[in-house]
Image (cartoon, helix red, strand yellow):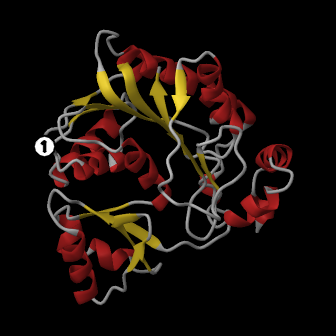
Amino acid sequence: MTEQIPEVLRDLLTTRYPDDAERILQGFGAKRDTTLRVNRLKETADGLRSELENAGIPVRPVSWYADAFRIPSGQENAIRAMSAYTDGHLYLQSLSSMIPPVLLDPLPGEDILDMCAAPGGKTTQLASLSGGKSNITAVEKDRIRADRLRYNLQRQGATRVPVLQQDARKLDDHLRFDKILLDAPCSGSGTVLTSDPKTSRAFSAELVRNSARLQSELLRKAVRLVKPGGIIVYSTCSVLPEENERVILPFLEKGTLSVIARSEPDLSGHLLPCEVPGAFLVCPDAEYEGFFAVCLKKN
């Protein structure tokens, strides 16, 4: 099945990861469980577990995140039919995409910016983690995606999250935030599925170059907006260093930012070699999509 991967992506992976390219390619064909998390604004983890089990849906915990559960694949339609889903007590979300909000660790009273927020999985997770007590501002430039973001925020009960329909690069430089989540637009190289050609149809070397340029511009803006000593979590669903390490390395080399190494989440056995110590570069496999995330401090 790996022959369905675009040749340009295969070449990039072979060049960047001579010892791990085949592992990544095999990960694109892995069948994953459905994963979801509880919305603390409306339910508890124990309460959601009981609802799922009473509905005949087997539940497995996630070691590093008490709010998350694994559900056997094929159960997604049954979950969507539950009132817990329609009422916003849970959110269907990949494990990889749950990592950045956990790294950001939103606390009550903090001013937090989500720079590229739609469709709202990470935004609503931030609200859930803080018990709805962080002051979150969500930004999305696309009108349709911004409407979807508002819908998800409303359904999840995240009522204290204003949405700005704006290009995050054009935010007023006088704004200041304690923490910023920059889940940057990317090539999606970590989320390719050999079973679904649509996931790689748009992939190209030009897309990688354009994404890297946009990512650098967004990170420069994030640096201007975060307070001294503040935190930026930078993440992408790409496994290519052009969109990850090489975007942040100039800021590290200049001393503008420094990496805050986190011991959690524990992703032992799921990581790829990375040029930035302390960053998480997740290999696509039977549990995770390919993903990059790093916690940065403004010096």
- Decide which of 223, 216 is in the foreground and name it: 223
Location of mark 1 (residue)? 159
Count residues near mark 1 (Cα–Cα under 10 Å), then give few for <14, some for 14-19, many for 20+: few
Q: Position of residue 139 (x, y in %)?
A: 32, 30
Q: Is residue 193 above or below residue 32?
A: above
The residue at the point 23 percent across, 52 percent down is 128
Q: Position of residue 88 (x, y in %)?
A: 20, 61
Q: Position of residue 101 (x, y in %)?
A: 38, 47
The residue at the point 44 percent across, 70 percent down is 63
Q: Is residue 171 above or below residue 79?
A: above
68 on left or right of 17:
left
51 on left or right of 166:
left
The residue at the point 33 percent across, 23 percent down is 166
Q: Is residue 226 above or below residue 129?
A: above
Q: Position of residue 163 (x, y in %)?
A: 24, 32
- Decide which of 198, 230 is in the foreground and name it: 230
Q: How many discs mark residues in the rendered view?
A: 1
Q: Secondary structure at mark 1?
A: loop
Residue type at mark 1: give it.
Answer: Thr
Locate residue 146: give its quadrant: top left
**Residue 197 can be seen, yes or no:** yes
Quadrant location, the N terminus: bottom right
**Residue 167 can be seen, yes or no:** no
177 on left or right of 200:
left
